[in-house]
Image: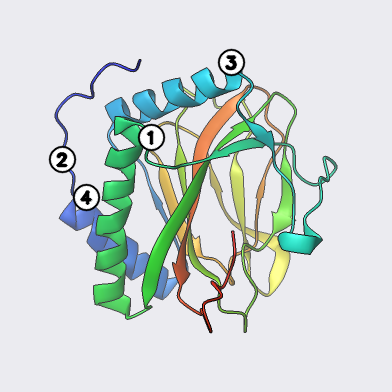
Amino acid sequence: MMPPLPRMSRTLNDHALSRLVDDLVDQGWFIGEHFIDVALCQALQEELQALAATEALTLAGIGRGDQHQLRRDIRGDAIHWLNRESQAQRHYLALMDDLQQQINRALYLGLFEFEAHFAHYPTGAFYKTHLDSFQGRANRIVSTVLYLNPDWPVDGGGEMALYASDNEQLELARVLPEAGTFVCFLSDRVPHAVLPTRHPRDSIAGWFRRNASLSGRVDPAR
């Protein structure tokens, strides 16, 4: 059983939130160091490591539904969907509820749901350049990544690279996967990749979705 979390705020820093919203508008992406409390990151990483030790992670694939397939030449992580089963998960998801409300209030995006999973990249794993959504399709709207590894070495690899929407050869930013760093970007406009990692790398990937359901069919299905 995981120890109880220390008392921490269930709301995000107002100044950081304001910068996040401004950056989404101005450039389509935000990178915030020390955005999430390091104690929460530690609790989440311990949970992810326990899942890995009990072989509770699933190899991640690409595509959804009938298009889903395992392609280790494209993506090498293993995942476990967050389901509120721990105090750490509930705390993090409460912060994301707060973020969803703030984004909707500021940008009128109509976000209605957040889904997220743990992601473990073993040594040598990567994820080639991709978009999380495609323009003209109502599904994932805003993507998020929270990094969980403390004291990540500068030569450890595993960075996330963000690229220009009109030129995937033009790198806009490179994010060191250090615990507490939080990245947020528009899902259909920011190509990104996880570069090969030289150490086991832990994170939480998440997506805010817009409701495009019709006749009882949830769009998009997970």
- What is the crowding at mark 3: few (fewer than 14 residues within 10 Å), some, or many (at least 20)? few
The dot on residue 151 is none
Q: Which residue is mark 3?
A: 53
Q: Gap in Å between the C-alphas at discs 1 and 4? A: 22 Å
Residue at 17% over, 56% down? 14
Residue 16, position as x, y percentages in the image = 25, 54
Toward the viewer: 18 or 52?
52
Could you tell me if the residues under marks 3 and 4 are in contact, i.e. CB atoms within 8 Å?
Answer: no
In the rendered image, the quadrant that contains the N terminus is top left
Q: As rendered, which of 7 and 38 lies closer to the eye?
A: 7
Q: CA distance from mark 4 to mark 2?
A: 7 Å
Query: From mark 3 to mark 4, how far is it between C-alphas?
Result: 32 Å
> In this rendering, is residue 180 above or below 205?
above
Closest to the camera, between mark 1 and mark 2, is 1
Q: Position of residue 43 (x, y in %)?
A: 35, 24
Looking at the image, which is closer to me, 9 or 61?
61
| Residue 59 placement, left or right of 188 | right
Residue sitting at x 18%, y 24%: 6
